[in-house]
């Protein structure tokens, strides 16, 4: 493979022509963050946005197997019989995200093995992402990675989160369609409500629906949904058995229906604009965190600290002086 | 009581002359944070610094009863027989800090009841502090409160933390002498090491030393201390039974010895300078957090967001534009 240096533009161009090594390298740049990743963002954010589907849920709920099945469904272009839905997708991106792990760990390796149906399929690009500990971390890197996949010509990206924390929910819910996966054994829907999942879910999947308790799980979820104010879309509750494929066609139909609603009502633009606003606020926070680091390093910091230690000024006055001296303008003035 | 308005200077002056209501009002200003608390800081950081003793440890380790006993010891000016140590202290401040509770809760009320020996003693000023949820919260408010007590003329402040999280350890370890309280039932010293307590402790107390397992607890702690590099001061391990007062005189002697070492070797200044550096960094962070909030509100933010939504620029470019426009100077330039 003739991977073209580390120039983002050349790498993205190569990725567009199917060079997977080039695409992997651009994603590594995004994952590492910093100035090189910003150069990538400058290009990627001008490209078409891929349709993104997020999957979140407790470990063991079968998200990876379900993702595997959805790849197949997307490739076959379900539903087939005239119902509204996306065309068959030429190439599908899969981001397996694990915010809790500093490096690619066992869970993701396990997922990769489970996804082996598609691991060597040139029409599927699977990438695991773990935080490298830089400021802002995955909550910035994942949306950037989705944009990169779009710039490389992929039309559909599945974002699967491995854990169950707030960051996992944040990552998975920053998609066009968000799927929350539960199992009959997961207990009642109160847990989903507690975790804030009712608010982010566009679709619920009760996976492992061949196990006892599936009716209760579906009923509980529907009862919780009955309490929510009615809107344009009531999240359907879909039963699947990912290991056999049962119910996956129905799930894909619902994904397609949700996408059609977003497109037809103009809600896709609204949703993406709201997402960009959250992204911009996150970037601002990271940039100002960098300023804190920088302000705490220079000789001006040492000079102000010396005055605080000498009892001449208090830390608040010192901070204001640093903000005015280093940032200028309106910063650091008393409100 | 003739509490003088809400002018920080007048309130502090009244507090210096023993008006407890005025002192309580200044501390409330500090607790609420914001610009009024900065006016207080401007005055308080120019006043003499009180000697501060922090107590941290798991709930149920008897910290409150021990604090109660230390108040008595400080008032009587232990040790009596010519050993080095502080003079009898005219007025003692006690800050009971609970970062985990948004409001003054049951635990602190319970502590106050346990401290009832001194609750009506005019020589003791007891204040419970809980976070009010403002940025920076208690990690800024507690050092400010210590300075306020100094400005009101108090020479000694005991800082007792109620919980066991990292913030509690941060608060208690930001004292001139830090005491870590364990009990025989607390398990082996590995727990203390795990919690980072070995690094911050100037003294260890094994309280409830009338219970089984006290020898093992003392031995475990000493074995852990044997592994640390030798320095100017090896944290002593003191056995106490706070409920009867047993060992408290010995503990006070050790506190006095630690203070004498810090003063004689010039280490007190070094320690306080390092503490002020951490405080200044925290203040900088809070000030920049305020900038994020402000940057995310104005019409400039809306204009940049509109450009991102239109696909003209990416969120990083928008953030840089906002930083340059709002803060000016060097901020927002590419490194």
Image (tube, coloured by chain):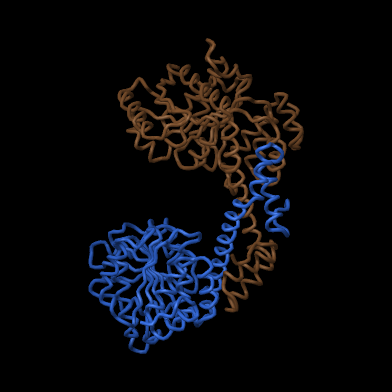
Chain colours: A brown, B blue
Is A129 on the left or on the right of B245, as rendered?
Answer: right
Whether residue A1 is visible to the viewer of this picture, yes or no, is: yes
Whether residue A122 is visible to the viewer of this picture, yes or no, is: no
Total tally of numbered discs in the picture = 0
Quarter where residue B196 is shown: bottom left
Q: Position of residue B287 (x, y in %)?
A: 58, 61
| Residue lying at the far top of the rendered structure | A81
Is A256 on the left or on the right of B203, as rendered?
Answer: right
In this picture, is B276 found above or below B306? below
Return the residue nearer the eye: B170 or B154: B154
| Residue lying at the far bottom of the rendered structure | B82
Quarter where residue A25 is shown: top right
Q: Position of residue A57 (x, y in %)?
A: 44, 33
Which residue is painted at 57% across and 39% down in the image? A274
Return the residue nearer the eye: A134 or B19: B19
Which residue is painted at 42% across and 61% down in the image? B131
Is A254 on the left or on the right of B319, as rendered?
Answer: left
Q: Position of residue A295 (x, y in %)?
A: 65, 62
* On-image quarter of the N terminus of chain B: bottom left
In this picture, is A78 found above or below B3? above
Q: Position of residue B48 (x, y in %)?
A: 50, 82
Which residue is painted at 57% across and 78% down in the image? A311
């Amino acid at each position: 493979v003739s991977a073209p240096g580390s120039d983002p533009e050349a790498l993205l161009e190569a990725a567009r022509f199917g060079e997977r090594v080039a695409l992997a390298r651009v994603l590594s740049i995004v994952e590492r963050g910093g100035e090189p990743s910003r150069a990538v963002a400058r290009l990627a954010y001008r490209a078409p946005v891929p349709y993104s589907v997020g999957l979140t849920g407790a470990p063991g709920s079968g998200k990876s197997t379900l993702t595997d099945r959805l790849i197949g469904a997307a490739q076959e272009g379900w539903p087939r019989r005239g119902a509204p839905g996306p065309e068959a997708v030429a190439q599908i991106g899969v981001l397996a995200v694990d915010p809790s792990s500093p490096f690619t760990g066992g869970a993701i390796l396990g997922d990769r093995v489970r996804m082996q149906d598609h691991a060597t399929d040139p029409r599927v690009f699977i990438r695991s992402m773990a935080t490298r500990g830089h400021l802002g971390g995955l909550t910035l890197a994942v949306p950037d990675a989705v944009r990169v996949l779009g710039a490389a010509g992929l039309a559909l990206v599945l974002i699967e989160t491995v854990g169950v924390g707030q960051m996992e929910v944040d990552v998975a819910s920053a998609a066009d369609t968000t799927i929350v996966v539960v199992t009959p054994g997961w207990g009642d829907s109160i847990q989903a409500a507690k975790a804030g999942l009712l608010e982010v879910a566009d679709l619920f999947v009760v996976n492992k629906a061949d196990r006892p308790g599936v009716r209760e799980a579906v009923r509980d979820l529907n009862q919780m949904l009955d309490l929510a104010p009615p809107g344009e879309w009531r999240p359907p509750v879909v039963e699947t058995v990912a290991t056999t494929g049962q119910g996956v066609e129905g799930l894909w139909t619902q994904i397609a229906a949700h996408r059609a609603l977003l497109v037809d009502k103009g809600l896709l633009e609204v949703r993406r604009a709201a997402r960009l606003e959250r992204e911009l606020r996150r970037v601002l926070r990271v940039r100002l965190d960098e300023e804190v680091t920088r302000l705490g390093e220079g000789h001006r910091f040492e000079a102000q600290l010396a005055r605080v230690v000498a009892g001449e000024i208090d830390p608040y006055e010192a901070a204001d002086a640093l903000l005015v001296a280093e940032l200028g303008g309106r910063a650091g003035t008393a409100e």
